[in-house]
Amino acid sequence: MGHPVSVRLERDIQTTLEEAARERGIGLSTYLRELAAQEARRLRRERIRAQSRAVAEYVAATPEAQAFFDDWGFDDWGTPAADPARR
């Protein structure tokens, strides 16, 4: 179970969110939890993608990193080769 969070909303924003929650047949708290969870997942995916881009840029710019990938038999997409003989 998570920790409670208190949020102060402007009345028109709260009304809009309550209507959206009601349309889904859930309470405002549940709706806000779902929105927060979706945003947290989006932020995590964004962070992972940024880190992956940083690794790809490093590998592309660094001969030692390229050699490491070549030694391990990775293809151009960073996926290990299916053929063990390539290693």
Image: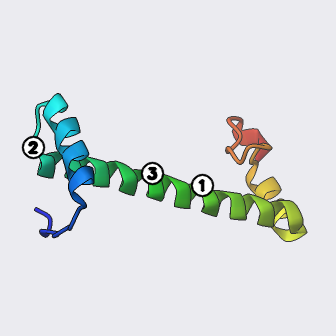
Q: Foreground residue, 32 or 66?
A: 32
Q: Position of residue 83 (x, y in %)?
A: 71, 35
Q: Which mark is residue 27?
A: 2
**Spatial separation of the CA atoms under disc 1 and disc 2:** 33 Å
Q: Position of residue 16 (x, y in %)?
A: 25, 43
For label 2, the crowd category at 10 Å Cα-Cα, with few meaning under 14, some 14 to 19 and many 20 or more, is some
Q: Is residue 83 left or right of residue 46?
A: right
Camera-near label (3 vs 2) is 2
Marks 3/2: CA–CA distance? 23 Å
Q: Mark 3 belongs to which amino acid?
A: Arg
* Mark sitting earlier along the chain (1/3): 3
Location of residue 70 by image quarter? bottom right
Quadrant assignment for the N terminus: bottom left
- Number of the label disc, if any, that sits on residue 49: 1
Among the two numbered marks 1 and 2 on one chain, the one whose residue lies closer to the N terminus:
2
Disc 1 versus disc 3: nearer the observer = 3
Query: Of the residues under marks 3 and 2, which one precedes in the sequence?
Result: 2
- Which residue position is annotated with label 3? 42
- Mark whose residue sits in front, 1 or 2: 2
Query: How much space separates mark 1 and mark 3, taking CA atoms?
Result: 11 Å
Give the residue at x 85% y 70%. Answer: 64
